[in-house]
Image: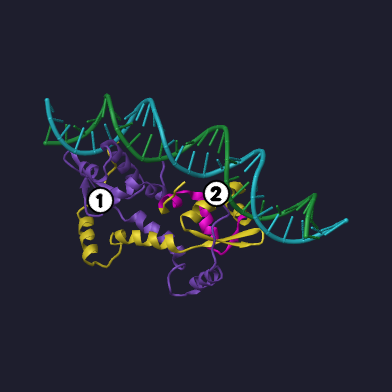
Chain colours: A purple, B yellow, C cyan, D green
Amino acid sequence: MQFDMFQTLADPTRRRVLDALSHGERQVNDLVDDVGIHQSGVSRHLRILHEAGFVVVRPDGQRRLYSLKPDPFRELDDWLAKYRGLWEARLDRFGAALATRQAQNETDEEPAV
Amino acid sequence: MQFDMFQTLADPTRRRVLDALSHGERQVNDLVDDVGIHQSGVSRHLRILHEAGFVVVRPDGQRRLYSLKPDPFRELDDWLAKYRGLWEARLDRFGAALATRQAQNETDEEPAV
DNA sequence: TGCATATACACCATCATGCATATACAGTCA
DNA sequence: TGACTGTATATGCATGATGGTGTATATGCA
């Protein structure tokens, strides 16, 4: 498996793991309780999250403590920057162009059904 | 199909569509050239993007002009806010807690192979 | 030996894609 | 006006690939 940042975030269980980790370092068994799937599944998700750079692991005896790593979040923030002009009020050169385009698309409809 | 924001973004082709639309309003056939898959596939991706709120449609004769809609991008930005303390320098109450946690996790390793 | 975590395997659901076809609209000609 | 044609876009279907999950088992550590 080779997950990119977006694919990694696509799974709701993995996002619950991230949410749980946002409160601090956690061991695997605690995450099992948090997310409500089997331990093997949590381990597997943690491997994916680790390979995608979302978490670091720190061994502590027989336990393994996972915590968040900022890199992919920052990467997502960078990706999002391209679209930030869509909703931000400040009209720099890029934002203004987008705003103009938005203005002429006030009307919307359902796609042909 | 019922795609949430993250699932919608998980597909690389859909992200290419969004990228193409970030340059302005486009009709379907133009997007076909941009993303390099069959027209039926582009239409399907556009349906998914529309259902997830990423795009709006404006009919123009026999053509249908698609453009971006800010809502899900803003939603993603909100989701990301929860993790922004991970890499931002300013240490408010939340950020400070995260920073502290980060500090004690300087060491990393590969998951047991 | 016992606990914590990772992996192998099988199963089932989902989904991206292309092909073929349907639908919608515009223009032309009678 | 109405029929026909061509263009633009959407949808039904089949297919192949991927991925999330649980069970069982292996590995690592005390």
Q: Position of residue B3 (x, y in %)?
A: 44, 49
Q: Which residue is mark 1?
A: A20
The quadrant in which residue A74 appears is bottom left
Q: Position of residue B8 (x, y in %)?
A: 45, 51
* Residue occupying image coordinates x 64% and y 59%: B63
Q: Nearer the viewer, residue D21 or B11?
A: D21
Crowding around mark 2 (Cα neighbors within 10 Å: few <14, some 14 to 19, many 20+) is few
Whether residue A55 can be seen here: no
> What segment carries the magenta color?
B6-28
Q: Which residue is mark 2?
A: B44
Q: Tag 2, which chain?
A: B
Q: Secondary structure at mark 2?
A: helix
Q: Secondary structure at mark 1?
A: helix
Q: Is residue A107 above or below residue C14?
A: below
Whether residue B94 can be seen here: yes
The quadrant in which residue A101 appears is bottom right
Secondary structure mainly formed by the magenta segment: helix
Q: Which mark is residue B25?
A: none
| Number of dots carrying numbers | 2
Q: Is residue A59 above or below residue A86?
A: above
Residue type pointed to by label 2: Arg
Q: Position of residue B35 (x, y in %)?
A: 57, 52
Q: Nearer the viewer, residue C16 or B55?
A: B55
**In the figure, is residue B5 to the left or right of A100?**
left
Q: Are marks 2 and 1 in contact (CB under 8 Å)?
A: no
Q: Position of residue B103 (x, y in %)?
A: 21, 57
* Residue occupying image coordinates x 41% and y 47%: A7
| Residue B12, magenta (yes or no) | yes
Measured in 3D between alpha carbons, the distance from the residue under mark 2 to the one under mark 1, in whole angstroms, is: 35 Å
Q: Tag 1, which chain?
A: A
| Residue B22, magenta (yes or no) | yes
Residue type pointed to by label 1: Ala
